[in-house]
Amino acid sequence: MDFLNVAAIVFFLLVWVALEPLMAMGWPRRNDSLSVDMVRIRAAWMREVLTRDNNFIGDAAILGHTINSASFFGSANLIVIVGLSGALFMEPNYGSGRGLIALFAAQDPAWFFQCKVLLIMATLLRGLSDFIWAVRQINYCLAAIGASPSRDEDRDIVSWTNALTLVLNPALRSFSVGVRSYYFTVAAAFWFIGPIPFIVATILSVGVLIWRQSWSNAAKGIMAIRRLLD
């Protein structure tokens, strides 16, 4: 593995590991980021759950839909991971010399080709782990909402809101992290083409993520709602 490939994989791993903690803190726009604004909006949602009439059907349907989505993405990840695992046992120059593998990886030694496959599998495995954890946490959240006191009972609304939000936020954040892992999967796939496309794809993937988190129309809409709540 030459220096350029080493630099590309080190750059990818640093970005991959560091991006999520930075985005959780609101980087690059600390006060106007989807990750930060959604924390405030989810807290308002849990307060509404506690103060509206005792009818959690709509809230349960929303969370149930999220569970189904996380389960679907997790199943899709698992299928792709199983499919990719077969590539670990094949020679990169097998076949008739046609197709993408022959075009971009025929000159690679087997171990180098397998490293590229393993990197894609690693991004998918991280997403699978996040989706599974999201499903479990959302189930905890449903149980917590169901256990919340009714309007006729003595209760501390602020404490209950904070407690429910502490359960809900990590659950939905895990789902978001799982979805964002696909951006890194796409970037990792460009390593088959070469280290320069790999680096460029990583930068573009991060750029798209940051733009969508801070400057997209969705981010602006969420920002407006958060300001109304404040």
Image: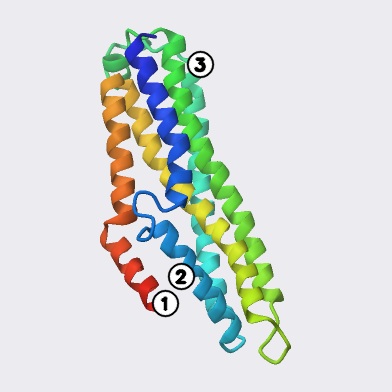
* Residue shown at the point (37%, 78%) measured from the top left: 228
Farthest bottom residue in view: 152
Question: Disc 2 marks which residue?
Answer: 41
Per the rendering, the mark at residue 89 is 3
Front-most of 4 and 130?
A: 4
Q: CA distance from mark 3 to mark 2?
A: 48 Å
Per the rendering, the mark at residue 229 is 1
Secondary structure state at the residue bearing disc 1: helix
In the image, residue 59 above or below residue 185? below
User: In the rendered structure, which amino acid carries the disc numbered 3?
Assistant: Phe
Q: Is residue 45 left or right of residue 198?
A: right
User: In the rendered structure, which amino acid carries the disc numbered 1?
Assistant: Leu
Quarter of the rendering occupied by the C terminus: bottom left
Nearer to us: label 1 or label 3: 1
The percent position of residue 3, horizontal first and vertical second, equals 35, 11
The percent position of residue 161, horizontal first and vertical second, equals 61, 74
Front-most of 32 and 164?
A: 32
Which one is earlier in the sequence, the residue at label 1 or at label 3?
Answer: 3
Q: Are marks 1 and 2 in contact (CB under 8 Å)?
A: yes
